[in-house]
Amino acid sequence: MSTADMWMYRETTWTQMDLAGYSVEAIDGSIGKVDEATNDVGASFIVVDTGPWIFGKKVMLPGGVIKNVDLDAQTVFVNRTKDQIKNAPEFDEKRYRDDAYRDDLAGYYGVGGAGYRDYDV
């Protein structure tokens, strides 16, 4: 997945809905609910409120790590483990729309980063 693809949803239909409030499932279990979602072309992401899993912490996930969205169950499935998400760069509410912060996340979740996972795995 290229850095550009990291910030795009895999399915264009996901850009036509508001994912806020949806549950979020990692490969190995629930991580919380979508607090905020953006459908910006080339800059899509979700911010997940992890609730009791990582008490009081939010995480930002690039749109490219979303594997599937179940509309009926209102659940977003991401192609990362809970540990990969927990160990991601800290969510920074002041910087999360900055290119430099997004570059940090892309470096972590992208090819060669500690949070990288191939879609076919």
Image (tube, rainbow, N blue to C red):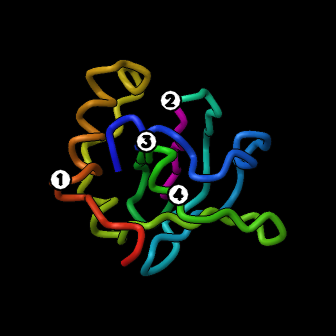
Q: Position of residue 107 (x, y in %)?
A: 21, 42
Of labels 1 and 4, earlier in sequence is 4
Q: Residue at x 61, y 44 (%)?
A: 35
Say which amino acid is labelled 3. Asp
Residue 25 higher or lower than 66, as above or below: below
Whether pointer 1 and pointer 4 mark residues with C-beta atoms closer than 8 Å, the reply is: no
Q: CA distance from mark 3 to mark 4?
A: 11 Å
In this rendering, the label closer to the viewer, 3 or 4: 3
Q: Earlier in the sequence, mark 1 or mark 2?
A: 2
Question: Residue 72 in the image: x percent, y percent?
Answer: 84, 69
Counting other residues with Cα less than 10 Å from the Cα at mark 3, is it few (<14), some (14-19), or many (20 or more)?
Answer: some
Which residue is label 2 attached to?
A: 43
Give the secondary structure at mark 1. Answer: loop
Amino acid at dot 2: Ala
Q: Which mark identifies residue 46? A: none
Mark 3 or mark 1: whose residue is earlier in sequence: 3
Disc 1 marks a residue whose amino acid type is Gly
Badge 1 is on which residue?
113
**Mark 4, residue position:** 66
